[in-house]
Amino acid sequence: MHAELNNKVALVTGGGRGIGRSICLMLARSGAKVVAASRSMGDLKSLKNDIRKLGGEIMVVPTDISKEKEIERLFRLVEKKFGRLDILVNNAGMGIYGKLVDFSASDFDKIMAVNLRGTFVCCKHAMRMMIPAKSGYIINISSVVGFKGYPAQSAYAASKHGIMGLTKSLAVEAQEYGIRVSAILPGGVDTKLVRDARPDLKRSELLSPDDVAQTVEYLLSLSERAAVDQIYIRRRNSEPF
């Protein structure tokens, strides 16, 4: 157990499955009080049972991250139960794929509402809780498409590039309050989203959600003297840089 995470309050969006689930389990094992948000109550119940078996503390909140009122409710519940927020991991995301020439504006808006707008609103509410404490850590899960481009992923890439712009600006704003902001850019993780986007990739060569969770753990283990802007983790067999 990391002493620096013991009894810290950590909120993870998209916490019910995949990368988010692995992050929640890591945080619980490290002694943090976990708040998991997801659209699927079934996924949240399963996660809750697993964390309880570990002896951890968890609060689950069904949340559609594309709806601002549901995000506001989520943060009110965190404030009411714990009175503070130490860690926010913006992990919730979705993907819709297709060539730009055929891509609908409504599908573009759906991706932006979850991946970018949802992250923006969560950051805003987290900052409002962290600023009075003059401490906190916000970690945004971006993607390799946060700096690269792939065919049939223009809308998804735009949302992840947007997360990088948001992260860079917020890191500067947050610094005066002792709040750190980092981005993790994974490439090719074994999740349904990646399997749908890249069916050509061999599952045996994909990163594990636990690899991303361990990267979050590394960031949270650093002393307050250290700040990391971004970490790109890729499949070992993929092209470097």
Image (cartoon, rainbow, N blue to C red):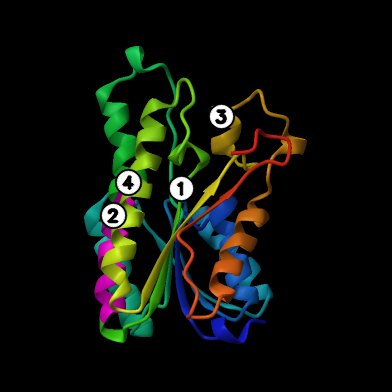
Q: Mark 3 and mark 2: span between their CA atoms?
A: 25 Å
Q: Within 10 angstroms of label 2, few (less than 14), some, or many (20 or more) residues?
A: some
Above or below — where is 187 with respect to 83?
A: above
Q: Are marks 1 and 2 in contact (CB under 8 Å)?
A: no
At label 4, which amino acid type do we have?
Answer: Leu
- Residue 127's spot in the image, x, y percent? 28, 71
Q: Quadrant of residue 236?
A: top right
Above or below — where is 182 with respect to 185?
A: below
Identify which residue, 219 or 197, lies in the foreground: 219
Q: Mark 1 and mark 3: span between their CA atoms?
A: 17 Å
Q: Nearer the viewer, mark 4 or mark 3?
A: 4
The residue range painted magenta reads 118-131
The residue tagged 2 is 120
Q: Within 10 angstroms of label 4, few (less than 14), some, or many (20 or more) residues?
A: many
Q: Quadrant of residue 52?
A: bottom right
The residue tagged 4 is 116
- Residue 161's spot in the image, x, y percent? 37, 41
Residue 196 has which mark?
3
